[in-house]
């Protein structure tokens, strides 16, 4: 089974050009869909793409 790449909060903050705190707020508020591995958030590329595309609508 191949695991799909998932982004960390730090990677997302670099991609979205926002702070780590902002990424965590997006995740906690449900604006950006993610999942936790232990205490750390992860986001699949497909979910990041959905989030980025919703701003354009």
Image: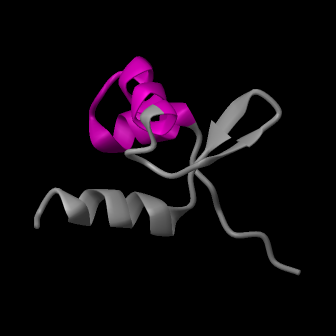
Q: Residue furthest right?
A: 1
Horizontal side, residue 14 vs residue 8: left or right: left
Q: Bounds of the magenta span?
A: 9-28
Q: Residue at x 30, y 41 (%)?
A: 16
Q: Where residue 7 sits: x, y (%)? A: 57, 49
Q: The N terminus lies in which quarter of the figure?
A: bottom right
Q: Where residue 2 sits: x, y (%)? A: 81, 77
Q: Where residue 52 sits: x, y (%)? A: 27, 58
Horizontal side, residue 57 vs residue 3: left or right: left
Q: Residue furthest bottom?
A: 1
The number of callouts visible is 0
Horizontal side, residue 45 vs residue 54: left or right: right
Q: Nearer the viewer, residue 52 or 5?
A: 52
Does the segment drawn in magenta span residue 46? no
Q: Main secondary structure of the magenta part?
A: helix
Q: Residue at x 50, y 52 (%)?
A: 33
Q: Residue at x 56, y 51 (%)?
A: 43
Does the segment drawn in magenta span residue 11? yes
């Amino acid at each position: 089974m191949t695991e799909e790449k998932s982004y960390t909060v730090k990677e997302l903050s670099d991609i979205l050009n926002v702070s780590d705190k902002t990424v965590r707020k997006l995740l906690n508020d449900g604006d950006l869909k993610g999942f936790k591995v232990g205490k750390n958030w992860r986001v699949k590329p497909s979910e990041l793409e959905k989030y980025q595309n919703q701003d354009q609508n």
